[in-house]
Amino acid sequence: MSDFRFIPYRHKAYSEEEMLSRAKEFYALLNARRSIREFSDKPVPAAIIENIIMTASTAPSGAHRQPWTFCAVADAALKREIRKAAEAEEYENYHGRMPKEWLDALAPFCTDWKKPFLETAPWLIVVFRRIYEIKGNTKANNYYVNESVGIATGMLLAAIHYAGLVALTHTPSPMQFLGRILNRSENEKPFLLIPVGYPADGVKVPDLKRKSKEEVLVIYS
Ligand code: IYR
C-alpha cells in the first residue's frame, strides 16, 4: 500500500453536443486574442491581476514543483527603471545585434527599440523560471522547468484575455536586468515580461492570418 493519499477527481461531464459547442466557443474566444503594443494608462484593480496569476499557477508542472514566480509590478518608479533597462538592450538589438534576416521578419510588426508600453500599462507581469529551490543550504532540482513555465504563461495569457484585458508577450533580450531590478534570488531566471491592461483608444493590430487546420493539424484515426 502506498503512503501517498489519492482523492476522488470530480469530473464535470457534458454531452457531445455540449462539448462541441463549448470547444467552438472557447476557440472563438481565444481566436480573438491579439498581442497589443499600445496601452491605455487606465488602472486595473490588483484583485483581477491576482486571480489571473492564480489561474496561471494551476498549470501542470514537472513533479508538481510549480517552478514559477509571477511578479506583478504597478509601481511607477519600478516600471520606469524596467523600461530604461529594456530600451538600453533593445537599442543595441535594433542597431546591430539582430541580423538583417531577423529585422526583416519583424518589419510587419513595426516594432523598434522604444518601449513606452512598459510605463503606460498599469501592470507588468514578470514571469520567472525557478530552476531549483533552496531548502536550507541544499538545492532541490526542479523538472521540465521550461515546459512548465511555458504552459503556465499560456494559461496566463488566456486568463488575461478571458478577463477582458490585453497583453504583450515581450522578450527584451538579454533580460537579466529584471532579476536585478526586482531583487529576485539567483535561482529565479526571467522568462517573459508581460505588460497587461486596456488597449489604447483606437489601437490597430497587424493584419495577420493564423495557419489553417490543414497546416497545423494531422489526424491519425
Ligand atoms: N525583443 C525585441 C524584438 C522582437 C522579437 C520578436 I521574435 C518579436 O516577435 C517581436 C519583437 C522587441 O521586443 O522589440
Image: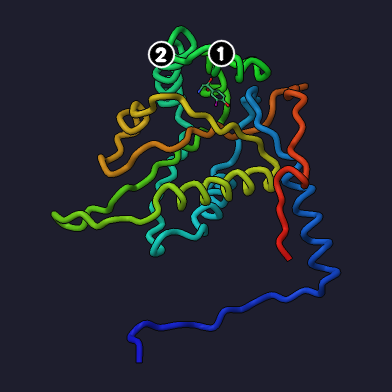
Find residue 48 and report its horizontal and vertical position in percent. 59, 47
The residue where tag 2 is placed is 88
Find numbered disc 2 in the image and state the secondary structure of the residue it sits on. helix
Q: Quadrant of residue 211?
A: top right
Which residue sits at x=64%, y=29%? 42
Quadrant in which the C terminus appears = bottom right
Judge whether 59 appears above or below 170 on screen: below
Quadrant in which the N terminus appears = bottom left
| Cβ–Cβ under 8 Å for marks 1 and 2 | no
Total numbered labels placed on residues in the image: 2
Find residue 173 and report its horizontal and vertical position in percent. 42, 24
Q: Quadrant of ligand 1?
A: top right
Which residue sits at x=79%, y=61%? 22
Question: In the image as oriented, which residue stretches furthest toward the top?
Answer: 95
Question: In the image as oriented, which residue stretches furthest toward the right?
Answer: 17
- Residue 67 horizontal side relative to residue 210, left or right: left
Residue at disc 1, CB closer than 8 Å to ligand 1? yes
Separation of residues labelled 1 and 2 (CA atoms)? 12 Å
Amino acid residing under circle 1: Asp
Q: Quadrant of residue 32?
A: top right
Q: Earlier in the sequence, mark 1 or mark 2?
A: 2
Judge whether 5 appears above or below 158 on screen: below
Which residue sits at x=56%, y=33%? 169
The residue where tag 1 is placed is 112
Q: Quadrant of residue 175?
A: top left
Q: Quick one: label 1, few (<14), some, or many (20+) residues within 10 Å? A: some
Judge whether 64 appears above or below 145 on screen: below
Find residue 208 and report its horizontal and vertical position in percent. 75, 28
Judge by depth and name the residue closer to the eye, 68 or 1. 1
